[in-house]
Amino acid sequence: MKKNWPLWEIFVRSKNGLEHRHFGSLHASDAEMALENARDVYTRRNEGVSIWVVESKNITASNPDDNGELFEPAQDKVYRHPTFYELPDDVKHM
Amino acid sequence: MSEHEVKKLEEIFEARIARDEKIEPKDWMPEKYRKTHIRQMSQHAHSEIVGMLPEGNWITRAPSLRRKAALLAKVQDEAGHGLYLYSACETLGVSRDELFEQLHSGKAKYSSIFNYPTVTWADMGAIGWLVDGAAIINQVPLCNTSFGPYARAMVRVCKEESFHQRQGYEIMLTLCKGSEEQKEMAQDALNRWWWPSLMMLGPTDAESVHTEQSMKWKLKRKSNDELRQQFIDQTVPQADILGLTIPDPDLKWNEETGHYDFGEIDWDEFWQVVKGHGPCNKERMKARVDAWENGAWVRDAAMAHAEKKQKNLKEAI
């Protein structure tokens, strides 16, 4: 009976004020080990001040095949952008 | 899917790459693209991992604490680079275990340069200077390759690698400024590593089977011969500063081409090493397989511990 270490996704905050960003993934037996390994694999040169680890199987991802129905409707809604509205040049602070 | 449909998808795919769009793991891709990427990324990862062995040989015998700390950091980086690349490779649906199995069984290759022995301390200098130098030339164009996870891993690798070459050159510089014996040691290391470093950039264009397809997919931006010429052109002046002689009697500056002409490479030796008959192929693979097998009980124990903790946690609730 052999079980492989699960895969974890690693998110690192590079400095306070910035969000955690996906840095990559690694294998570890549990969350604690994933944190320790992430520190060695992804932050050897002061790349971070905080690490999140999430087991990969817990992430639900959208399917690129659905990109049309998911993201295309936003393309023809130009009225969601400020430049859609034409105002005279002498209107200030808007 | 019909043949016609696949062909149409392939055309859309190739057009995306031609537009410099990145391909991400869940996107549709031709089977050949997937296989080629698994092969190249895993070879690259294996090279990083096996590449730790020749240098590991000198960590405990580095001549000063400064050198030891630097070498240790370099070897640790190589482990890290191997891990970035294995993870990038796994996004294509191959498991870490399969990748290790391919390495250990000899099915997957790694860079042939790591099958040469490191017999003196000067080899640490020559490897950093020449081997990492050649690797950087190979790797920089990959930061723009079409497969997203590979490109992202390479950006990180390239950023970290420039210290590797500088620390190697500094070792050579120190030896060359030292005693007569130390300078001889540096020259001897250059003599042994020069030709294998040129071979590291791959077979000549005429012999290279994957070049055309790889260029299309941006797995390659320049041909092996172009990269080799670039390496020679930038390395010869560095050897001059060290006061060392490149072991090639045919090496000569060519005013007309603006490049160095160089002598014939012994490709028989290259293919011998690739096929497993280099000086250290067996030793390297044995070290890898031993590390994997002797570590099995640790991996199993960690997994058992994690499962037990999970179970206790559930029962407590």
Image (cartoon, grey):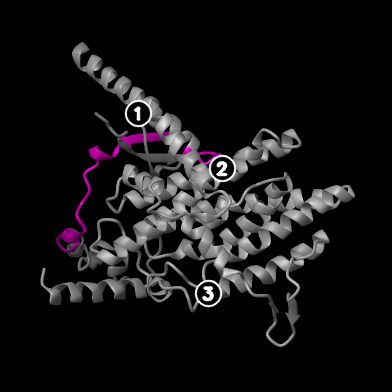
Marks 3 and 1 belong to one chain: no
Q: Which residue is mark 1?
A: A31
Asked if residue B23 shows in the view, the reply is: no
Where does the image place residue B65, in percent across and percent down from the top left? 73, 33
Please state which amino acid type lies under the numbered disc 2: Leu
The chain identifier of the residue carrying mark 3 reads B
Position above or below: B51 against A58: below
Q: Which residue is mark 2?
A: B53
Instruction: State the CA–CA distance, disc 3 to disc 1.
Output: 47 Å
| In-front residue for pair A65/B42 | B42
Other residues around mark 3 within 10 Å, as few (<14) / some (14–19) / many (≥20): some
The span picked out in magenta is A41-69
Q: Is residue A52 magenta?
A: yes
The chain identifier of the residue carrying mark 2 reads B
Other residues around mark 2 within 10 Å, as few (<14) / some (14–19) / many (≥20): many
Position above or below: B157 against B209: above
In terms of sequence position, does the residue under pointer 3 or pointer 2 come before the other? 2
Q: Is residue B71 magenta?
A: no
Q: Which residue is mark 3?
A: B204
Please state which amino acid type lies under the numbered disc 3: Thr
